[in-house]
Image (cartoon, grey):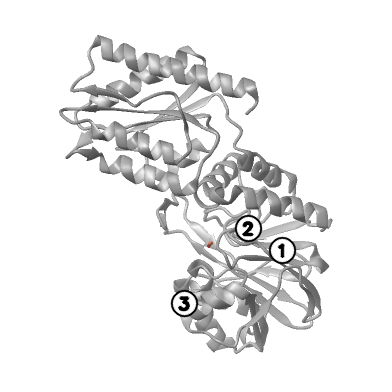
Amino acid sequence: MSQDFDAVKISEHVYWVGAIDWDIRDFHGYSTLRGSTYNAYLIVADDVILIDTVKRPFKDELLARVASVVDPKKVRYIISNHSEPDHSSSLPEVIDYVKPEKVFASKLGLKDLEGYYGKDGIDTVSDAQSMQLGGVNLTFLETKMIHWPDSMMTYLADDKLLFSQDGFGMHLATSERFADEIPEATRDEENAKYFANILLPYKQLIVKLLDRVKALGIDIQIIAPDHGPIYRKDLDKPIDQYYKWCAQKPTKKAVITFDTMWGSTEIMARAIEGGLESEGIDVIVLPLKSSERSIVVTEVLEAGALLVGSPTLNNGIFPTVADVLTYMRGLKPRNLVGSAFGSYGWSGEGARQVNDYLTQMKIDLVGDPLNLSFRPDSDGIEQCRQLGVLTGRKLKEVIQSGS
Ligand code: FEO
């Protein structure tokens, strides 16, 4: 086994023993432009406990980091907080290698691990269950749907440390292990991107979880997620960011995203942009020829308006526009006003199908889709500008009403 990988001590009893994936650029459809990490942790007390594992190709890196602290065969317990394969796909081989006395997961985690790997013999733990294990005190908190039904977090009372699995994670490969060692702008950007692309559909559950942890009065000094850096300072900041993103309070920011075949829908987008700007709205335009879907949803996270344009191709919506709308619909952004628009030659289904998506997404529509044939003339351009003006006014009304 390679010994090139060292563990990093992060608290009295805990070492980071995860893996750095400098290579990954697509995480189930989310562009991870700065790579990622799969964090696993080792508690070294009377016994040795491994918290989560890593993606299968990184199993040797995990075991090498463990070996830099202790013989991996001394791992007596493994706790699987989350069964998604980025954290569990090396688990069967790690179990076979270290032969732990017990492996713990939530009840749904057990089901997932059986389903994925046919693994039996896993012990289950319940929500709010506390136990003394290997000389430390652990409490398990079920966090269903953050990010999967099986998910749970584990609190290590001895070190005031929360193993938060996907919660408070970000896709960021770095040689630094702590958030305070990373430039704030990079952290904020990747944190928002991760929230928008992974956690946004579960915002109500996240608020409940944050409120619950507050009510329990658990003293947390370190948050150790399964992706990206570890928080050991200023924990209020990521917590407050989560509250803000869960609320999705509309701001004076509009996102226009579109694709275009022969430039007409682009002309419409730019005229709408002008109308919005004339109302004092900050506008970001994301042409889908150059803007990847996870960037679009990240920009929408703190926006108050979303305007989407599609030409009509073969009696339907343009494929790139369908892609981004299908992705965004699943992520359930809320509290947005918006409009559909597009250019067509003969039939005009593109903008109408965009409108259907926006309706399903519960977007407060300014009016019917703006559908213009062929190339917009000066009257058409003025209609686009007016659509921007009306959307901007509606957004300001919504903000003023405090809804
Ligand atoms: Fe990082 Fe939901 O897995």
Which of disc 3 and disc 1 is earlier in sequence? 1
Where residue 91 sits: x, y (%)? Answer: 53, 78
Left or right of 204, for residue 390? left
* Quarter occupied by the C terminus: top right
Disc on res. 177: 2
Density class for disc 1 (Cα within 10 Å; few <14, some 14-19, many ≥20) is: many
Please indicate whether residue 127 sits to the left or right of residue 2 in the image. right
Specify whether residue 160 is in view.
Answer: yes
Residue type highlighted by circle 2: Arg
In this rendering, the label closer to the viewer, 1 or 3: 3
The image shows residue 84, relative to residue 192, as above or below, that is below
From the viewer's perspective, tell me whether residue 176 is left or right of residue 363.
Answer: right
Identity of the amino acid at label 3? Tyr
**Crowding near pointer 3: few (<14 within 10 Å), some, many (20+)?**
some
Residue at 57%, 64% in the rendered image: 149
Q: Residue at x 61, y 33 (%)?
A: 249
Dot 2 and dot 1 residues touching (CB under 8 Å): yes
Asked whether mark 3 lies closer than 8 Å to ligand 1, one says no
- Could you tell me which secondary element the residue under label 2 belongs to? loop
**Mark 2 surroundings: few (<14), some (14-19) or many (≥20) residues within 10 A:** many
Decide: is 15 above or below 73.
above
Identify the element where label 3 is drawn.
helix
Is the C-beta separation of discs 2 and 3 under 8 Å? no
Reading the image, the residue beneath label 3 is 116
Residue ID for mark 1: 10
Q: CA distance from mark 2 to mark 1?
A: 9 Å
Indicate which disc, 2 or 1, sits on the residue closer to the N terminus: 1
Q: Is mark 2 within 8 Å of ligand 1?
A: no
